[in-house]
Image: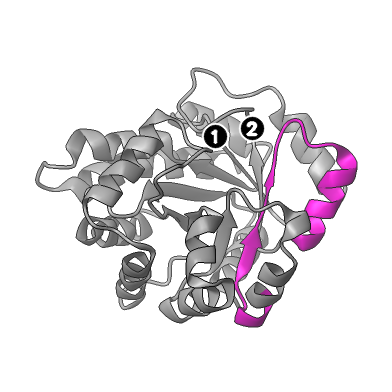
Amino acid sequence: MNRLDERFSRLRATGEKGFVVYIGAGDPDLAATVELALAFDRVGVDVLELGVPFSDPLADGLVNQLAAQRGLESGTTPTKVLAAVAEIRRQSQIPVVLYIYYNLIHRQGPEAFIGAAAAAGVDGLLVLDLPPEEAGAYSEFMRAADLCPIFLIAPTTPEDRIEAIVRRARGFVYYVSREGVTGMQQQVSDTIGPMTQLIRRHTDLPVAVGFGISTPEQAREVARNAEAVVVGSAVVNQIAEHGSAPGLAARVAGFVETLVKAVREAT
């Protein structure tokens, strides 16, 4: 069984909510990415979402744009990200999703990239700029490799398109709780409750909610309406602050642990 499917099946059986953490791969370098992944596993993170650095990350706010820039400056490439995932796999079975832009997949060739990702130990791909309607061959390659295609649903997505999106999804559905780009916010969106209910009319897949969640209190509130909570920018901001300091992984994992605990308290 794919590690994503297994993890969410286990969470459902125990009645717990999941926690997904996003970081930029190669920020500040790939050795740190591996250390952070292992530290996140130790504090109970359910899914690791690795952003593959890209020169034009249109879905990302400033914090994650700067992380992508630092990743590029550290020499991180898609091939090196897969090597880092393989290194993580030597010590951990934490489910790994790559957050990636399609140009990076297209350049290598979808079949070749997806095969290499599966061989490295990746469990799913979240391709930010690939519309589900144009994902025919991609979906076939993902199915053949037993990888989960993760698709986004936005507050503005109409119901008929939600139905079409979830038919193509596997692993979980990612609800983008705000219009616009990633980034920390002072309050959680008021669309989360109604939209997660609407999504569940069309699928039994877990619904993970992200974009704008940055504190334990917000994570706990969101977890009441979702099967999983995604936090990215707030964690990436911690890496930006402590990237050159000793004990980076322990420092960031300490912050992440407060979010994990908050999500568990909402169950």
Is disc 1 surrounded by few (<14), some (14 to 19) or many (20+) residues within 10 Å?
A: many
The numbered dot on residue 211 is: 1
Instruction: For mark 2, give the secondary structure.
Output: loop
Question: Residue at (54%, 31%) from the top-left corner?
Answer: 181
Residue at 12% across, 42% down: 244
x, y (%) of residue 267? 61, 44
Left or right of 159? Residue 174 is left
Residue 14 vertical placement versus 237 (above, below): below
Q: Earlier in the sequence, mark 2 or mark 1?
A: 2
> Which segment did they paint magenta?
143-168
Question: Does 168 sit above or below residue 235?
Answer: below
Question: From the viewer's perspective, is 66 left or right of 121?
Answer: left
Q: Residue furthest right?
A: 160
User: Is mark 2 in CB contact (under 8 Å) with mark 1?
Assistant: yes
**Which three-letter amino acid code belongs to the residue tagged 2?**
Ser
Q: Residues within 10 Å of mark 2 (few under 14, many from 20)?
A: many
Q: Position of residue 65 (x, y in %)?
A: 38, 37
Single out the residue that lies furthest toward the left. Answer: 246
- Residue that mark 2 sits on: 177
Q: Residue at x 60, y 72 (%)?
A: 147
Which residue is painted at 58% across and 77% down in the image? 111
Asked if residue 203 lies in the magenta stretch, the reply is no
Q: Quick one: which residue is furthest to the top in this view?
A: 186
Residue 116 in view (yes/no): yes
